[in-house]
């Protein structure tokens, strides 16, 4: 993706779940060649069994792309000892006046969070599922919001896309309190 005009914005969100011997491969390349642009990337993966994943993301901010904001993040959870993730976020900055960051994490489910849920009578399978949902919540929320904005700004003939996005948003709001404490643990995964 190339930002060739001023004031452009792009949000790239990715979420994947892999198991058995599946392989997930995400590659992104963003070229900021004009000033005053924004890019925001969040990719999350949950890998189980012998699955593997790879993330290679590159952001290049050219000399003339002053006042660029560019952010890139890749977070991953491995559910088994045999699952593997390779991640390589890259940031090349040739401009002076920018706000940019990049980072990656690879880890396992937080045992303290799992214990907390289990101590409250939640079975291990359900507790793990709640933690995985909490981990994925940020990307899912962004995707639902994007779908809702797209549907409401594009007058669709039957409105079914807008209705689906709206009902998903209502479900998230209704269940927000229920999962609020779980999401706080997801940030530690």
Image (tube, grey):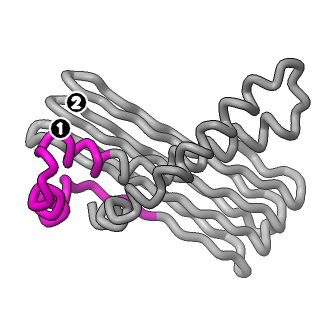
Q: Is residue 117 magenta?
A: yes
Closer to us: 55 or 65 = 55
Quarter assignment of residue 113: bottom left
Vertical side of 157 occupied by 78: above or below = below
Q: Do the residues labelled 1 and 2 touch (CB within 8 Å)?
A: yes
Q: In which quarter of the image is residue 85?
A: top left
Q: Name the residue under label 2.
A: 51
Mark 1–mark 2 Cα distance, whole angstroms, equals 5 Å
Residue 29 visible? The answer is no
Can I make out residue 104 in this image?
yes
Residue found at x 73% / y 57%: 32
Query: What residue is disc 1 on?
Result: 83
Q: Nearest the camera: 124 or 38?
A: 124
Q: Where is residue 52 in the image (x, y as percent from the top left)?
A: 25, 33
Query: Is disc 2 placed on a helix, strand or loop?
Result: loop
Please give the name of the residue rendered at 79% of the width and 51% of the height, measured from the top-left corner: 3
Quick check: 110 left or right of 63? left
Looking at the picture, how far across and down is residue 134, in whole percent? 37, 52
> Percent x, y for residue 69?
69, 68
**Residue 124 on the magenta span:** yes
Range of residues picked out in magenta: 103-132
| Residue furthest out toward the top | 158
Residue at the spot x=14%, y=59% of the render?
120
């Amino acid at each position: 993706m190339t930002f060739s005009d001023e004031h452009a914005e792009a949000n790239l969100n990715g979420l994947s779940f892999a198991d058995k011997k599946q392989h997930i491969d995400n590659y992104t390349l963003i070229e900021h060649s004009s000033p005053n642009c924004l890019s925001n990337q969040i990719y999350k993966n949950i890998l189980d069994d012998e699955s593997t994943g790879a993330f290679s993301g590159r952001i290049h901010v050219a000399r003339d792309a002053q006042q660029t904001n560019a952010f890139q993040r890749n977070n991953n959870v491995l559910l088994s000892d045999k699952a593997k993730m390779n991640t390589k976020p890259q940031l090349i900055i040739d401009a002076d006046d920018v706000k940019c960051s990049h980072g990656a994490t690879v880890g396992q489910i937080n045992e303290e969070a799992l214990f907390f849920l289990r101590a409250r009578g939640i079975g291990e399978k359900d507790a793990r599922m709640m933690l995985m949902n909490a981990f994925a919540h940020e990307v899912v929320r962004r995707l639902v919001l994007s779908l809702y904005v797209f549907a409401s700004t594009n007058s669709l003939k039957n409105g079914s896309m807008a209705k689906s996005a709206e009902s998903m948003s209502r479900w998230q709001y209704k269940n927000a309190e229920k999962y609020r404490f779980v999401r706080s643990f997801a940030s530690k995964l």
